[in-house]
Structures are given as C-alpha cells and as structure tokens.
Amino acid sequence: MATGERGESGRAAAPPKIAVIDLHKSFAGREVLRGVNLEVEAGESLVIVGGSGAGKSVLIKHLIGLITPERGHVIIDGEDLTNCEPARCLAIRRKFGMSFQEGALFDSMTVFENIAFPLRRHTRMDEAAIAARVQECLALVHLDGTGGKATSELSGGMRRRVGFARAISLQPEILLFDEPDTGLDPITSAVIDAVIVEMRKQLDVTMVTITHNMQSAFRIADRIAMLRNGQITAIARPDVFRSLADPYIQKFLAGEPLEEEVA
Ligand SMILES: Nc1ncnc2c1ncn2[C@@H]1O[C@H](COP(=O)(O)OP(=O)(O)OP(=O)(O)O)[C@@H](O)[C@H]1O
Ligand SMILES: [Mg+2]
C-alpha cells in the first residue's frame, strides 16, 4: 500500500521506515540496479537475497547514503536521503547502524576501543558513560568480559559480534547487516543468527540483512526479497517465499548453480 493510503480500517497506514523508489545505478556502463522498488516497515526484519554480484551490497550502501544513485530515491521516515541538505543527510545517516560485509574492525584497537569509537566520535559521553554503554553492547552480543582483548585474538564469529556491538552502540533505529555469516561454519552461523534475532527482540529496530544463506534468511526474516537482474523480483513472508513457483528462486533455495546474469 502506498504511503498515505488508508487501510480497510479507515486508519492511515503507517508510513514505511524505508522506501526505495526506482533506484538505478551503473558502474563503468554496466547497469547494476535497474529500478529497485522496495518498502521496509518500521520494526520489520527484511532479508535480501540474490546471486553473487547481483548488487546487494550496492543496494544496501544506497540505503545509508554511501552511494548516490543515478536515478531514483531512498526515503527514510518520509525524508529523501537522495535529495537533502548535507546537515539533514547526516542526521538521517545517524539513524543507521551498519555491519559491513568486510567486517571492518580496527585491528590496532581493543574490542572495547572498537565499540567506544563511535561514542567518542559522535557523542559527548564521559568515560564512565562510555564504559557502561560498551558493557551493555557487549552483553547484548554475549561477549561480556572481552573488552580488553585484541581483535586479532578473536574467532570469526566473535569478530562479527564485535561488529554488531559497534553497530548498535549509538542506538540506531535501523540496523543493516551485509552478509553477517560469510565465511563462518554452519554452527557459528546459527549462533550469529540467534544473536541477530535476540538484538531484534531487545532493541526497537528495523533490520535489513543481506545473505546468500537461505537457512539464515529463514531464521531471521519477517519477509525475504530476491534481487535479480537489478530489480526486486519477489518479496514475501518466508513460508510463502519457500513455495514460490519461480524456477530461479527454486534453484536458489535448493542451492543449485545459478546461470550467469546477463549484463
Ligand atoms: N565501487 C564500485 N565500482 C565499480 N563497480 C562496482 C562498485 N561497487 C560494486 N561494483 C560492481 O557492482 C556489481 C554488484 O556488486 P555488489 O558488491 O553489490 O554485489 P553483491 O550482490 O553484494 O555480491 P556478493 O554476494 O558477492 O557480495 C559487481 O559487478 C561489482 O563489481
Ligand atoms: Mg555483497
């Protein structure tokens, strides 16, 4: 339902937290996004799946304004991130916490300093308040007591969780996860998904997660969207998504090799 329309009850439908409208982006003449349309409801956990190179990371980076589209809009809480004053853009970007595909921890810093970094940079909290907030974030990802560790001492799954703790430190309204379980074994991957589900319960957030891993998608999604050929070709609740007739989606679900996308 479009923003501003009224539902059967006659009440105005809640506006989407995120609305992506006709988003286009090319690199070196290759069109990666070819008119993406997508709405994410407040409080929803949306998972975006798609083949490697489909443009998932490019799409999620548009949501937070790290990439500017050639055409189209990203609307956050009714404000157009693709067309706003720099100060407003900054304020909108502060609504986000992001865990990047590459992990992106500062390896010269301890776990504590990694999580404290955004707090020192963007708030005027004193040391005691920073320490308390870092402990809270570590507890949320079940890493109590690890603040003094060097990031090089951590396992892959622990590094991901430190990344999550850093992403939530400024109490974002929207959390973006790009491939949170890439490179992890299935058991660690399930632990990471459980942490994501728990964060969702504990924090009042909207989540967008990208993954290749359908098991993971089914564990954490309210809805699953397929990005293919530069567009969202399907979006549905997990139980409905599982039974979609689209042969590409059925191959994807079965983990079968996918044909090369036509550029
Ligand atoms: N900054 C950039 N400059 C040039 N090309 C880019 C840039 N960022 C992404 N691309 C290209 O856009 C396409 C989509 O990339 P993207 O990283 O979004 O894929 P993805 O769906 O996230 O894949 P994966 O599942 O492997 O992470 C790729 O062909 C990639 O090479
Ligand atoms: Mg990617």
Image (spheres, rainbow, N blue to C red):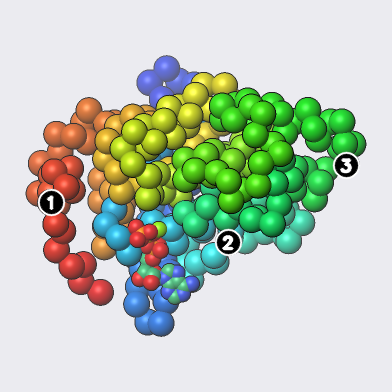
Q: Quadrant of the C terminus?
A: bottom left
The extreme front residue here reads 153
Residue for point 27% across, 35% down: 215
Q: Which x, y percent locates residue 261?
A: 21, 67
Q: Which x, y percent locates residue 60?
A: 47, 54
Residue for point 16% across, 58% down: 258
Residue for point 72% across, 33% down: 134
The residue at which mark 1 appears reads as 256
The residue at which mark 3 appears reads as 124
Q: Quadrant of the N terminus?
A: top left
Q: Which x, y percent locates residue 21?
A: 44, 54
Q: Would you call the spot at circle 1 few (<14 residues within 10 Å), some (14-19), or many (20 or more)? A: few
Secondary element at tag 2? loop
Q: Can residue 166 be seen in this snapshot?
A: yes
Query: How many angstroms separate mark 1 from mark 2 (CA)?
Result: 33 Å
Q: Is residue 202 above or below residue 158?
A: above
N-term mark: 3 or 1: 3
Q: Which x, y percent locates residue 212?
A: 30, 48
Secondary element at tag 3? loop
